[in-house]
Image (spheres, rainbow, N blue to C red):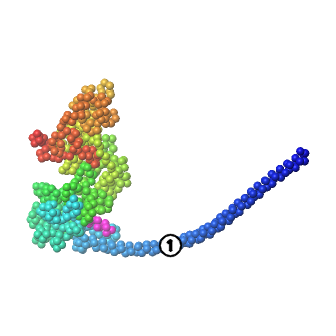
């Protein structure tokens, strides 16, 4: 083939290729054109949608702007309305205060029956000061302050109004209680006479008090009691003699009133807030009553003397004779009717117990709620005055300063009644008390009862399962006693006291049941928890806790090791081992950790014979006398009979006296129980 033919052939091939490429390019152009049209359509639709949404947003913005403008207008209207209401409120409050002030002034005059003559009486009997009246007129003091100063004289006496049935949680009158067989009618009449003698014959349905005549008209009392109660009511209205209006004491002195009956009335009036001065019809505190001749000191001192003034009331629950003040201390305050009620039932809810930090002191008979005085006060169910009165019935807290071993001054608060004890410095360090609260207490803004209740409300006490018998619980006086006090006051014999103190000394220290502290023998002697003889007898038991030093190796030995090495008396050693095992395990003198008997046996510290003796309860001697039943018991039985003290977490053993039994009369005890 010639070159021209080849060129022509190549040219044709190139044309074919170009033609094919042109066709392909044309297809791509057509395809791209189609895609461009689609994209243009989409873009146009998107633009249309965007314009539509923009229009919608513009409309929404316009509406929002309009709503904001309306809201601003509403706010302005509300502010204007609020200002108008505030002005009206201020005006009404000023008018109300003026009216209230006038009403309160009249109330004071009505409550205390203060006429022009009576004001002179109040001043004369030192119940009201002329200076106070002048300050009130000048606006230097408020009506509330004057009311507060007169409250103790014009307030309702704290007489017992009826019975609280524990099972049903309902209140009933004394007469109804007698009808239902809860108490003898003669007992019920005693309490009604006390009500009449304090001017507080009470209708339990309303809580209101009435005179004898009013009570008869309303059917609150029987007509058969009329004469007896009218006679008792003379303690309020006065005994008319030779044209004079005599008080109870004056009637006794003039022989118008029987002396025994008069003393019983005086005891009731003293217990419920003060003696009544019939001339002005208000109660007078005991101190002022003596000054005013409503009572003399000899009679006052004899009110609680069983010989010159026998107990004139019967405890409705037990039937035992009692003073009115003793029964009042066991009563509840009913917030439903604002009266005091005697609790009747088997729960004994007002009894003080070591297992409960507070007794029930307040109830709401309308719904059956029961609470402590502090709970009621914090819940605003009772006022501060009632809270303090109820607290004083339950406890008697007193503060004293003392110095510890390092010479640091401590402030200790002690409940004289129950034996509980708190250290203010410890309460601060443990965050049970804030510095501001202590300052308020020091400044008189908080009472000693409030500061104690604040601390108790924050304390968390855990039962100490390793506790020995830390002390006694006097079931009669409801009080904690140390072991030595229990012996000195005749609850137990010296041998039992020694054994219990041995158990304390070899398990961590001498226990202070009032505070829960455990101290060394020297400190216990300093604090009066031991006498010199006991201190000497307990030395080796303190060694048992701290460890016995081997004289040759200077190694610290446990009790079993020391007994095996003949470095510790065998009999005393066995007692220490028994005390330690029964309170949680043998004590490692180096760490003071507890070790079980099985671990001790495995370690070889106790031989098999000794281990068998320790395991067998038959070998546990009845070396103690139960302070309650006076029967012989083992240390294990003492622990089983004990209760955990909610105040300290330590174990207490209940104790009671038997007539003729005590430190000076062991012979009588042995004779009675041998």
Instruction: State which quadrant residue 95 falls in.
Output: bottom left
Single out the residue that lies furthest toward the top: 552
Q: Residue at x 74, y 59 (%)?
A: 30
Magenta-span inclusion, residue 148: yes
User: Does the rendering let one see residue 181?
Assistant: yes
Q: Which residues are magenta?
A: 142-151
Q: Residue at x 20, y 34 (%)?
A: 619
Single out the residue that lies furthest toward the front: 1
Q: Which residue is mark 1?
A: 74
Which percent across, then down, holds residue 372? Answer: 27, 57
Tally the numbered discs.
1
Which percent across, then down, holds residue 562? Answer: 27, 29
Q: Residue at x 21, y 41 (%)?
A: 637
Q: What kind of secondary structure does the magenta stretch mostly adopt?
A: helix
User: Does the rendering let one see residue 43?
Assistant: no
Please, what secondary structure does the residue beneath circle 1 have? Answer: helix
In the rendered image, the quadrant that contains the C terminus is top left
């Amino acid at each position: 083939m010639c070159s021209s033919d080849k060129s022509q052939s190549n040219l044709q091939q190139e044309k074919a290729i170009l033609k094919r490429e042109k066709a392909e390019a044309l297809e791509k152009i057509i395809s791209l054109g189609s895609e461009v049209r689609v994209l243009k359509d989409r873009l146009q639709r998107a633009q249309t949608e965007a314009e539509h949404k923009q229009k919608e947003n513009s409309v929404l913005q316009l509406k929002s702007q309009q709503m904001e403008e309306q809201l601003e207008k509403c706010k302005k209207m509300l502010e204007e309305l609020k200002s108008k209401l505030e002005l009206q409120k201020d005006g009404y409050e000023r008018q109300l205060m003026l009216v209230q002030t006038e009403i309160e002034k009249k109330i004071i005059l009505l409550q205390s029956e203060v006429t022009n003559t009576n004001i002179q009486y109040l001043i004369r009997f030192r119940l009201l000061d002329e200076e106070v009246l002048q300050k009130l007129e000048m606006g230097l003091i408020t009506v509330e302050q004057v009311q507060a100063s007169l409250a103790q004289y014009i307030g309702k006496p704290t007489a017992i109004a009826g019975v609280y049935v524990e099972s049903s949680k309902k209140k009933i009158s004394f007469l109804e209680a007698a009808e239902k067989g809860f108490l003898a009618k003669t007992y019920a009449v005693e309490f009604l006479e006390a009500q009449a003698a304090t001017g507080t014959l009470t209708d339990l349905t309303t809580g209101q008090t009435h005179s004898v005549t009013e009570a008869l008209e309303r059917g609150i009392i029987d007509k058969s009691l009329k004469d007896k109660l009218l006679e008792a009511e003379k303690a309020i209205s006065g005994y008319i003699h030779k044209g004079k209006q005599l008080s109870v004491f004056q009637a006794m002195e003039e022989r118008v009133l029987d002396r025994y009956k008069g003393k019983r009335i005086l005891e009731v009036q003293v217990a419920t807030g003060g003696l009544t001065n019939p001339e002005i019809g208000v109660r007078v505190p005991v101190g002022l009553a003596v000054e005013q001749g409503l009572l003399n000191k000899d009679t006052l001192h004899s009110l609680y003397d069983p010989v010159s003034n026998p107990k004139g009331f019967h405890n409705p629950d037990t039937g035992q004779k009692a003073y009115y003040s003793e029964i009042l201390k066991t009563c509840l305050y009913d917030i439903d009717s604002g009266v005091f009620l005697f609790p009747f039932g088997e729960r004994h809810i007002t009894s003080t117990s070591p297992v409960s930090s507070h007794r029930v002191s307040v109830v709401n008979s309308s719904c059956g709620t029961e609470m402590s005085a502090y709970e009621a006060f914090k819940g605003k169910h009772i006022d501060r005055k009632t809270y303090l009165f109820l607290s004083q019935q339950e406890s008697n807290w007193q503060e004293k300063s003392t110095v510890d071993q390092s010479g640091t001054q401590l402030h200790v608060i002690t409940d004289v009644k129950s034996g509980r004890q708190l250290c203010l410095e410890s309460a601060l360090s443990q965050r049970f008390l804030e510095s501001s609260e202590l300052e308020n207490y020091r400044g008189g803004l908080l009472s000693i009862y409030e500061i104690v209740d604040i601390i108790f409300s924050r304390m968390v006490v855990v039962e100490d399962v390793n506790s020995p018998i830390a002390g006694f619980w006097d079931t009669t006086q409801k009080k904690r006693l140390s072991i030595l006090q229990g012996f000195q006051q005749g609850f137990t014999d010296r041998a039992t006291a020694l054994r219990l103190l041995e158990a304390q000394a070899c398990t961590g220290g001498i226990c202070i049941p009032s505070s829960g502290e455990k101290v060394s023998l020297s400190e216990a002697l300093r604090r009066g928890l031991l006498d010199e003889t006991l201190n000497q007898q307990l030395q080796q038991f303190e060694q048992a806790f701290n460890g016995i030093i081997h004289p040759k190796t200077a190694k610290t030995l446990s009790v079993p090791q020391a007994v095996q090495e003949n470095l510790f008396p065998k009999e005393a050693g066995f007692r220490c081992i028994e005390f330690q095992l029964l309170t949680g395990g043998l004590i490692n003198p180096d760490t003071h950790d507890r070790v079980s008997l099985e671990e001790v046996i495995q370690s070889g510290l106790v031989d098999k014979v000794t281990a068998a003796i320790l395991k067998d309860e038959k070998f546990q001697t009845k070396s103690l006398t139960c302070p309650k039943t006076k029967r012989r018991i083992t240390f294990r039985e003492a622990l089983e009979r004990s209760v955990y003290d909610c105040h300290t977490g330590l174990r207490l053993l209940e104790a009671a006296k038997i007539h003729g039994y005590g430190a000076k009369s062991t012979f009588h005890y042995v004779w009675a129980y041998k």
